[in-house]
Image (cartoon, grey):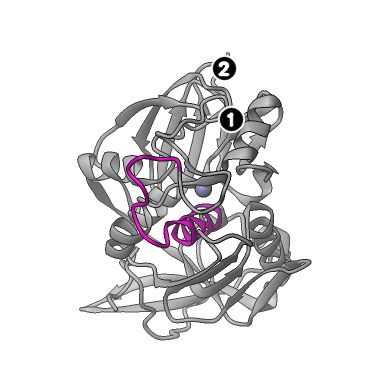
Amino acid sequence: MASIDPHQYTLNRSVSCNGIGLHTGKLVHLTIKPAPSNSGIRFVRADLAARPGIQAGIDQVVDTQLATTIGEGSTRVSTTEHLLAALLGSGIDNAEIELDSHEVPIMDGSAGPFVHLLKKCGRKKQRALRRVLRITRPVEYSDGEKTIRIEPYDGFKITGRIKFDDELISEQKYSVEVTQEKFHKEIAHARTFGFVEQVEQLWANGLALGGTLDNVIAISWDRRSVLNEEGLRFDDEFIRHKVLDVIGDLALLGCPVLGHVIADRSGHSLHLGLMKEIAKNADCWEHVKLKRNGDSVFSHVFHSTKSAGDRLRPLFSNPSDDTVIGQPSCAV
Ligand SMILES: [Zn+2]
């Protein structure tokens, strides 16, 4: 396992793309721009007067049905998860995302096109050091049979499981140590999916108007095959996409995480539930700041005197304690 890079990164230059909003079906223009150290990920609605912004954080989550939506005041940006996964999985800490709609374009239903954009412009090392959220005791959140848990782990690992009563998906499990390389090769290209009757139901309700076989895997009525002519990108593409969603939603914690996430039939609302539990249980985690010392990377414990709810927000404020805890592993 490679060592975590202690520095923050942004993009070398701005990159843009056009795509369709999954629910509105409208064309969206999106630009990802470099941003200063310690600024995190911020969305800007270029189509609204005064160009209001929304910081990507758990306190800004306003809806988790169908996709993750963040908001401040009356301003909204939805379907943030695949783009945020691409940024976290590509090791980008700071970026400004400008778009002219309330919806991040769905592209091909995966994070692949965003990863392609980020690779095209490259990333730039910044002077400031990263702050990492290190889990020190297990935290769990459940809703009926659905559970999600994070345990202490010297890296960033996700183990996911889904179970459906059909022949095609049935039960799928997938476990991965999330490094940049593995994210790019094994996770980023897994597409979102839906049962075709669910898609029809969404259409009837005026949703998923941009949903086509170019941006969603449609599972056929008999639940034995997919309608997409090209088939699946991975035999277990469904669970890989679920893992992609975990990464994209946990990016709302605002910094890389050291921990092992075990997600059983989870979705956006469970991911938010887990993040809120983490925020509530300040004795289960700490912020560690990475410092380079010769060739070694050491983590330094960050103790905050702020309340649990507040502690997740000022991720990039100055550390007050420098206790060495060892060398964490992961390469995002
Ligand atoms: Zn997704």
Quarter of the image containing the N terminus? bottom left
Total number of numbered discs in the rendering? 2
Query: Is 103 placed above or below 116 here?
Result: above
Residue 186 placement (x, y as % from top left) = 33, 61
Residue at numbered disc 1: 208
Query: Residue 50's mark?
Result: 2
Query: Residue 70's mark?
Result: none
SS class of the residue under badge 1?
A: loop
Q: Please name whichever residue, 26 or 58, is drawn nearer the observer in this view of the structure.
A: 26
Going by the numbered disc 2, the residue's amino acid type is: Ala
Please give the name of the residue rendered at 23% of the width and 45% of the height, measured from the top-left corner: 119
Residue 323 placement (x, y as % from top left) = 48, 83
Within 10 Å of the Cα at label 1, are there few (<14), some (14-19), or many (20+) other Cα atoms? some
SS class of the residue under badge 2?
A: loop
In the rendered structure, does residue 232 fall within the stretch colored magenta?
yes
Residue 29 placement (x, y as % from top left) = 41, 22
Q: Give the extent of the magenta segment.
A: 227-250
Question: Ligand 1 closer than 8 Å to the CB at disc 2?
Answer: no
Q: Please name whichever residue, 66 or 5, is drawn nearer the observer in this view of the structure.
A: 66
Outermost residue toward the front in this view? 222
Please give the name of the residue rendered at 43% of the width and 36% of the height, measured from the top-left corner: 215
- Mark 1 or 2, nearer chain start: 2
Within 10 Å of the Cα at label 2, are there few (<14), some (14-19), or many (20+) other Cα atoms? few
Outermost residue toward the right in this view? 144
Quarter location, residue 297? bottom left
Query: Is 267 placed above or below 60 here?
Result: below
Q: Please name whichever residue, 168 or 267, is drawn nearer the observer in this view of the structure.
A: 168
260 vs 279, left or right, is left
Quarter location, residue 69? top right
Going by the numbered disc 1, the residue's amino acid type is: Ala
Q: CA distance from mark 1 to mark 2?
A: 29 Å
